[in-house]
Amino acid sequence: MKPFKLKLIYPKWQKLRGQTTFNLPPHGPVAFAATLPEWVDVSFTDENVEAIDFDEECDGVALSMMLSTQVKRGWEIADEYHKRGKLVMAGGISTMLHAEEMVNHVDCVFLGEAEGRMDEVMTDWVNGKMRKFYNYMGNLPPIESVGPCRRDLYKRELYNHKGVQMVDLFHASRGCRFSCYPCAVSYLGGRKFRPRPIDKVVEDMAGIENNRLFIVDNSLAQNKEWEKELFTAIAPLKKKWISHTIEDDPEVLDLAAKAGAWYVYQAVYDTSDYIKERVKRYHDYGIGVEGTILLGLDNQTEDDIKRLIDFLGEIDLDLAEFTVMTPFPHTKGYDDLLRQGRIFDFDWNHYNAGQVVFQPKHMSPERLQELYDYAWKSFYASESQEQKMFRLFCNVALREMEEGTYRPRDRRLANKSFGHDVVRNIKHAVV
Amino acid sequence: MKVSPVYYDEIFNFKGEWDMPSACGLKIRTLNGKPCVIVTELYQDNPGTSVTYAGRKLAEQICQAKGLDINDIVYLECNPDTNSKLSFYDEEFFAVDFDADLQHRYRQLEKCEVIKISDK
C-alpha cells in the first residue's frame, strides 16, 4: 500500500480562568494512532501547545477530541482543511457525545473504539470510498487488543514546565460499571468494567520512559482482585502515579502505596465523617488526595455549598478541584435537566465545567457561578495551587530519591513552560 | 443501582442512538381510554442509550412492536426509585409530548397522577 500521510490534530480549548494551566500529553490521539495500519504515516499536533501549520503536506486529517469544549474548534479546523481540499475524519469521546452535529462539519465520523477498525477505514479512505459514518458503538473490541500508545509522536519538550516533565497518561481498563449522575463514560466505553490483561498493562507501562504517570481509568475501584493483582504486578516498575479512586480497603491501599500511588482524585460530595476518614486513610498510606468537588447539584443549597467548602479545610486535602454541574449529553444529568427545561445554554464552548449553563434548583445561575469562584479562592487563599502542587511534587521526588529512580529536572528547559519562555520563580527551584 | 421489576412487565430491547443495543423497562396500561406506554430507565442494565435521549425513536419502536399509533398514546418516562441516597435517583414520572417541533415537551406528573397509573 502506498504511504498515506495523516495529519492528526488535538484541538485547543479555553482553559479555566484563575487556574494554574498544565498541559498533559493527551492520551486519545496516541491511542488512536497506535491502531493505524503501518502504511499510515502520522504527524501529530496538539494545538494546546503549538500552532497548526495548515499548509503542512498531508493526504488527510484526523481530529481527536475528548472534551465538549474542543468540538467547535475542531469544526473550525475542519473548515480550514476543507478550504485546502483535504478530507477530515473525527473521533474520540466528544465526537461520540456530539456526533449529530459533528456529521455536519467533517467528512467522516468514527464512533466507538478504534482497535481493529482502522485497516478498514483507512483502506476505504485511500480508495476514495470513505463513509460518512463508521459506527462501532455497542460493538466494542476485545480489551486484549488494546496495545501500547504511539508516545513517540509527542514533542516532549512541549509538555515540560520549567524543566519538569509532565506525567504520561495511561489506561489499565475501559468501561465502567457505575452510572454516575454527571458522567458519560458508561455510555462511551460500555457499562461493564473491562480491565486489560495484567501482563499487557505491565508490558505497556514498562515501555514508557516517563517515571510518572496518570492512570486515567474512570475508577480503579471496580474489581478488587484485579486491582490487587494490578498493583502487585506494577510495583517492581517503580513508577509513581496519579489515579482516580482506589478501593477503600487496607490491603488494597497498602498494595497501591507500594506500587507507587502518588495521589488520587477523590470525590468529596458531602461533609460526612466517612469522607473525612476516607481522606485520612489515603494519607495513612502516604497517598496524597486531590478532592474533586462538584457544585450545583439539586441536593445542594447555598448553605450546603458553603459548608462543603469550609469542610475542605478540616480534612487536609492536598489539592482541590472545583467544577460546576455540567449536563454533558448522554448523562443522567443531561436527561434530567433537559426534561425539566433547565438547560439554557447549548454553546459547547461553555461546557468546560467552570461555567454555569443550567438553572440550579436552589439558586440563580449567577449565584452558583459566584460560589464556584468563591470555592477556588477560598481553598487556595493561604497557599496557592502552584505551591500546593509543588509540595506534592516534592513528596514524589523524595520518594524517587529514596528508591534511586529520581531524574533531575532538565536544566535546558528550566526557563520554558510548555514551549514558551518563562521567568523562573527561584524560591520554588529547590528540587 | 438495580431497578426493581415492579416498574415493568417486560424488558424492551431497542436500537438507541447510532443503533446501539439498548434496553428499557416497559409497561402498557390504559389511561383515559388511551394506551399509556410507560418506559423505565434501567441505568446499569441499559447497555446503550437512555430512554430520554432515545425519545421519539424509542416510542416509535415500541409502537411498531406493539401495534400502537404514536399519535394516540400517552407516553410516560419513568426514573425509577433505586434506593439510592442521592435524591436525583428518586422516582419521577414525566409525560412526553412528541408534537413539539424540535425538542420534546416534558411535564412531571404530580403524585396523584402517579398513583393513578401505579400498580406497584
Image (cartoon, coloured by chain):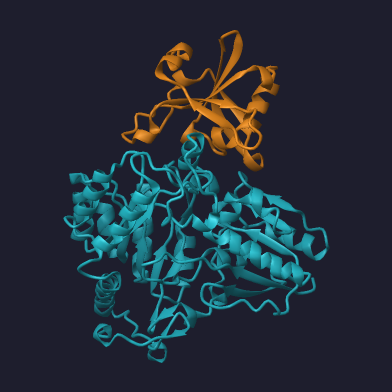
Viewer-closest of A281 and A234: A281
Report which quarter residue A395 is drawn in: bottom left
Q: Is residue A2 left or right of residue A206?
A: right
- Kindly identify the residue that appears in the image at 33 percent across and 55 percent down: A370
Viewer-closest of B92 and A266: B92
Q: Position of residue A335 (x, y in %)?
A: 50, 38
Q: Is residue A276 above or below residue A241?
A: above
Viewer-closest of A64 and B110: B110
Q: Is residue B63 left or right of residue B117?
A: right
Q: Is residue A388 left or right of residue A93?
A: left
Q: Position of residue B34 (x, y in %)?
A: 61, 11
Q: Position of residue A27 (x, y in %)?
A: 51, 65
Q: Colour of chain A?
A: cyan
**Outermost residue, top direction?**
B33
Task: Work out which quarter of the rendered image holds the N terminus of chain A and state it.
Answer: bottom right
Q: Is residue A130 above or below residue B93?
A: below
Q: Is residue B60 above or below residue A337?
A: above
Report which quarter residue A423 is drawn in: bottom left
**Outermost residue, bottom direction?**
A412
- Kindly identify the residue that appears in the image at 60 percent across and 36 percent down: B103
Q: Position of residue A33 (x, y in %)?
A: 61, 67
- Kindly identify the residue that appears in the image at 47 percent across and 54 percent down: A173
Q: How many marks?
A: 0
Q: Which chain is depicted orange?
A: B
Task: Work out which quarter of the rendered image holds the C terminus of chain A and state it.
Answer: bottom left
- The answer to whether residue A314 is seen in the rendering is yes
Q: Is residue B86 above or below residue A368?
A: above
- The answer to whether residue A36 is seen in the rendering is no
